[in-house]
Image (cartoon, coloured by chain):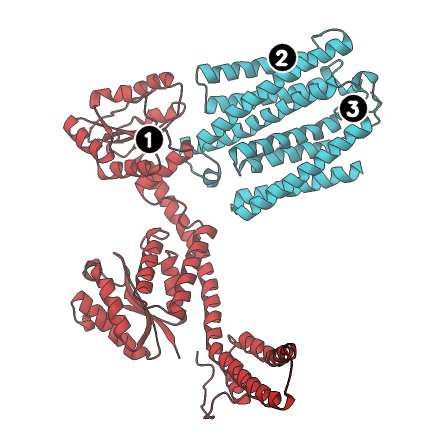
Chain colours: A red, B cyan
Amino acid sequence: MIRIVNIGMNHETAPVELRECLARDPGHADRALSVMRELSCIKEGLFLSTCNRVEALFTTERTEEAKHSVVDLLSRLGGMASASLRSSLFTYEDQDAVRHIFRVASSLDSMVIGEPQILGQIKEAYSAATKEKTTGVILNRLLHRAFHTAKRVRTETGISDAAVSVSYAAVELAKKIFYDFKGKKVLLIGAGEMAELAARHLMTQGVSAITVANRTFQKAVEVAQGFKGVPVSFEEIAAQLLEADIVISSTAAPGYVITHDQVKGSMKKRKNRPLFFIDIAVPRDVDPEVNDLENVYVYDIDDLKGIIQVNLGQRQEEAVKAERIVEEEVLKFEQWLKTLEVVPTIVSLKEKAETIRQTELKKSLSTLGGLSASQLKSLETLTLSITEKILNDPILFLKQKADRPLGKSYLDTARRLFRLDRENGDEVEHGSE
Amino acid sequence: MAVFLYGFSLVLILLATAAFIVYLVRQQKSTYHWAYRLLLAGFTSLTLFVGHEYYTLGVAPVLTLKSSLSFFAWTILLVYLLFHLKFRLMVLGSFVAPVAACLLILSTTLPAGDLTVKPIFRSLWLPVHIGTAFVGNGFFAVTFVAGIMYLIQEWQIKKKRLGSLYSRLPSLETLDSINHFALICGFTFMTAGMITGSIYAQYALGSYWRWDPKEVCSLVAWTFYAVLLHERLAVGWRGRRAALLSLFGFLILILTFVGANLWLSDYHSFRNMGGQPGG
C-alpha cells in the first residue's frame, strides 16, 4: 500500500546552523530530486529547501527503506553523520504528512505565522519536481490541494492581513491615510536599514518621488542613488515639508529635527494636505506635539511596535480558524486517496465486462449473419448500455464505500464476486488504519 | 398595490441593511454581493412605489411627511447607487443603507391621513423643484455619512487606537474625496432646487421669495454649504474640519426639512398642503 511520508527539519526542530548547512547551496534541491528519482523505493518525490526549512516529501510502498534512504540523502547533503542529524528531523506519515504540507503551504508552520513567501517557495519546489518528473498522481493532487488550502486560508481568514514588521506596519498606515501612492512624495531624513526598507516598500507601492536629506550631504547622495531619488541638504528640510506627503525620519540627532512650529507653518502653505510622519529614530526626531496638528499624523517606533504586537496576536487568533480549514482539506484529501484504491478494481471490472461483451457479440454475429450497418450499430449500442447499466450500481457503491472502514472488504468481495483476480485467495487485511 | 410595494421595499431594504452590517462585521465579499443585490431590488421596488404614488395622486408624492420621508429614502439610495458607480466603495453601503432604512421606518410609523390635492400642486414645477432639492439632500446625506466615517477613522489613526473598524473603513483620502464630491453635487442640486422653487413660487403664488421660514432655513443651509465649499477649494479646509462641518450642515438641513415643514412654515408646511390629519 502506498504511503505519503514527509521527513525534514524546520525552525523548531533544528538550530539555525544546521538549517544553514543544508539550505546554503541552491544546487542541493536539484541533486536531492535526482537522487530521489533514482531510488527504487521512492515512487514520487518533492524537495523543499528554504532558509527556515528543509523537507523531503515522497510516496513509497517500502516505508522503512525509503525513510532510511532519505535520511542518508539529507546527511550527505549536509555533510554530517545521519545519527547526529536524526535528532533534528521530524517524520510525518500518511494523514500527518498531508496535514503538515497543508500547514506549511498555509504558512501555519512558519516562524512568523502568515508570512507570504512560503507558498511561493513551495510552488517553486513543485515546479522543479515536475520539471524533473518526480511527481505523479498522488503528489500532483496533494500539492494542488495544498495550494488550494493556502488560498482558502488566505482569503477566509485574516492570517496575513496585518503587518508584522515595522516597515510594513508603516506602509499599511500610510495606505489608510492616502488612497493610493501615485503622485505622492516621500522625504527620507537620515539613513538606516528600517527607514530605507520602509521607503523601498513605499516605492514598490507606487510612490512617485523620493527625496533624501542627510546631515552629511555625501551620505544623502549615496542613499538617494539607491532609490533614484533626489539628495537635499539638511537645511532644505523645511522647504521639503511643503512638497512631501510621507516623511520617514531616522537620524541620530539627540533633539527634535522636526518641530511643532515648523510643521504648523508649512501646513498652511500646503493647504492642509495630509502629512504623515514615520519616526523610526531613537531618540525621536519628530516632536510628538506635531501629532496634535490637524491633518498631520505622527507615528514613532513604539507606536509601530505596538501595532505589530496587536497584529501578531490577531494572527494567532486567525490561525485557529486556519487550522480548521486545514483539517477540512486533510479529510477531503483522505477521501480522494481512498477512492484511488478503488480505481484499479473499477478498471478491471470494466475490462472484464468489455471482454465478455466482445466475445459474446462475436458469437452472435456469426449466427445472425447479414446485418445492415444500422442494425450492427444498434446491436453495439444495446450491448454497451446493458453492460454499463449492470456495472453502474456496483461501481457507484464501491466509490461511495471507498472511505468507509469496511471499504476494503467491499473491494475484496467485489473482486471475488466478479473473479477479477485469477489466483483467488489473497487475504486482504481490512481496517489497516 | 401601493401597500404591497411599500412593504416589499421596506423588507428588502431592511434585509439589505442587515446584510450590509453583517458584511461590515465579517468582511465576506459574498455577503456584500447579497446586500448590494437586495438593496438594488429594494430600490427598484421603492421606485415602482414612488412611481405608483405619483400616478395615482397625479402630483409628486411629497405632500405629507410620511411620503416625503420615503421619497427622501429613495433619493438617498439613488445617490448611493450613483456613488457606487464612481467610487465602488463597498463599505459605504453599510453606513448609507441604515440611514435609508431609518427614514423608511420613520415613515411607516406616521399615519397616512387623507389627502386632498390642491390645484396649485398640479404643476410640472413641483416635481422639478422637489426632485432637485431632494437629490441635493441625498448628496448631503452622503457627505454626512462620509463625514461620520471620516471622523471615526481619523480618530482611530490620530489616537493610535486601531480598532476593528480601522481595517474596515477606507482611507482618509478616499472618504475626504467622497465628501468633497458629494458636497459639490449636493450644492449644485440644492441651488437648482432653490431656483426652480422660486420660479414655481412666482408662477403659483405671484412672488419669487416670501421669507417663509422654510426659505430662510434653506438659505441659511445654502450659505453654510457655500462657505464650506469655498473654504475647501480656496483655503484647503479638508479632512476633519470639513467632515465636522458637513455633519453640522446636514443637521441644519434636517431642521429645515422636519422643523420648518411641520411647525414653522407657511406654505411649505405639510399642514397647509392638506396632508396632516385635522390640518
Check the residue under mark 1 and report the chain it is in. A
Which residue is rendered at x = 17% and y = 32% of the image? A222
Q: Nearer the viewer, mark 1 or mark 2?
A: 1
Using residue A136 as the reference point, say whether residue B237 is left or right of it: right
Select label 3 or label 2 by which is in front: 3
Q: Give, as a three-letter code, the residue at label 1.
A: Ser
Q: Is residue B215 left or right of residue A169?
A: right
Q: Rate crowding at label 3 as few (under 14), some (14 to 19) or many (20 or more) other CA atoms within 10 Å.
A: some
Locate residue B253, reporting x and y percent.
Answer: 62, 20
Name the side, left or right, on which A6 lies relative to B49. left
Q: Could you tell me which chain the residue with mark 3 belongs to?
A: B
**Quarter of the image with the C terminus of chain A in it:** bottom left
Q: CA distance from mark 1 to mark 2?
A: 44 Å
How far apart are the alpha carbons under marks 3 and 2?
26 Å
Q: Amino acid at mark 3?
A: Val
Residue A329 position in % (x across, y down): 46, 63
Can residue A284 be seen at all in this image of the molecule? yes
Q: Nearer the viewer, residue A427 or A323?
A: A427
